């Protein structure tokens, strides 16, 4: 009997019955145990060696968010990298649209395996790469296109890394949250689906202009 059958049996068994306090407590306990199991087996391995302030919870991108990223990268080519790639859906879509190589960096081993499963199921497993690696140790000097769906707590630190490592013609696209100090070249979408694009050449020029203004 699979999980769906078990769930259906539970629902059927509860229909027409009134639940007392003990029954509600049992349901809450089972729900909590299931949530903890998912955390322990799937999510926690990616956090064990990461400092608390740099931890980023896994939250899959929606279809609209993925589409917005691709729209902001339309007409571009070359290497596409997703930092903190989760279940790999952005990398997979980039491969479908011709970006080569299309790569994802994800610290959680379970999510890396899930990413490869999705890629295999779609027939694109030979065109993507998912690496279990700390994004802070990834070298970005040859990355033409970057996508980021990360928590605000890490974005300012990531700005410094990208500014020092990315080539001048690179474009960075962030989803859910904008980079805190960079001025975007383009914005698309609304609410949680909004995405921001940043051109490194423009960002570097803006930083230089600010430094010159400070010196004066």
Image: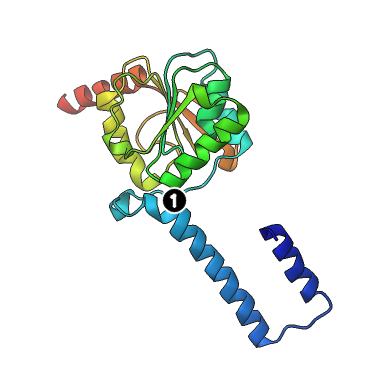
Q: Residue at x 49, y 14 (%)?
A: 76
Q: Residues within 10 Å of mark 1 (few under 14, many from 20)?
A: some
Residue that extends furthest to the right in the rendered view of this protein: 16
- 49 on left or right of 121: left
Quarter of the image for residue 9 reads bottom right
Residue that extends furthest to the left in the rendered view of this protein: 215
Q: Position of residue 213 (x, y in %)?
A: 22, 24
Q: Residue at x 78, y 83 (%)?
A: 18
Q: Nearer the viewer, residue 159 or 16?
A: 16
Residue 35 visible? The answer is yes
- 205 on left or right of 121: left
Q: Nearer the viewer, residue 98 or 4?
A: 4
Q: Nearer the viewer, residue 172 or 210?
A: 172
Work out which quarter of the rendered image holds the N terminus and state it. bottom right
Residue 189 visible? The answer is no
Work out which quarter of the rendered image holds the C terminus and state it. top left
Q: Position of residue 35 (x, y in %)?
A: 53, 63
Q: Is residue 51 above or below residue 74?
A: below
Q: Position of residue 132 (x, y in %)?
A: 37, 38
- The residue beneath circle 1 is 57
Quarter of the image for residue 141 reads top left
Q: Residue at x 57, y 42 (%)?
A: 192
Q: Position of residue 25 (x, y in %)?
A: 61, 81
Q: Residue at x 37, y 14 (%)?
A: 169
Q: Nearer the viewer, residue 193 or 56?
A: 56
């Amino acid at each position: 009997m699979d999980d769906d059958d078990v769930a259906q049996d539970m629902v059927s068994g509860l229909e027409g019955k009134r639940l007392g306090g003990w029954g509600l407590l049992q349901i809450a306990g089972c729900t909590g145990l299931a949530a903890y199991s998912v955390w322990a087996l799937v999510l926690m391995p990616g956090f064990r060696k990461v400092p608390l302030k740099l931890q980023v919870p896994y939250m899959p991108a929606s279809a609209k968010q993925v589409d917005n990223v691709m729209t902001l990268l339309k007409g571009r080519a070359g290497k596409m990298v997703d930092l903190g790639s989760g279940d790999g859906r952005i990398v997979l879509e980039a491969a479908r649209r011709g970006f080569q190589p299309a790569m994802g960096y994800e610290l959680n081993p379970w999510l890396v395996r899930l990413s490869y499963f999705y890629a295999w199921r779609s027939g694109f497993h030979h065109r993507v790469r998912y690496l279990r690696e700390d994004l802070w140790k990834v070298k970005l000097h040859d990355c033409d296109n970057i996508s980021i769906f990360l928590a605000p707590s890490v974005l300012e630190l990531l700005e410094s890394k990208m500014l020092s490592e990315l080539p001048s013609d690179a474009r960075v696209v962030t989803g859910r949250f904008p980079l805190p100090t960079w001025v975007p070249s383009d914005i698309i979408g609304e609410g949680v689906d909004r995405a921001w694009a940043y051109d490194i050449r423009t960002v570097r020029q803006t930083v230089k202009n600010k430094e010159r203004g400070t010196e004066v």
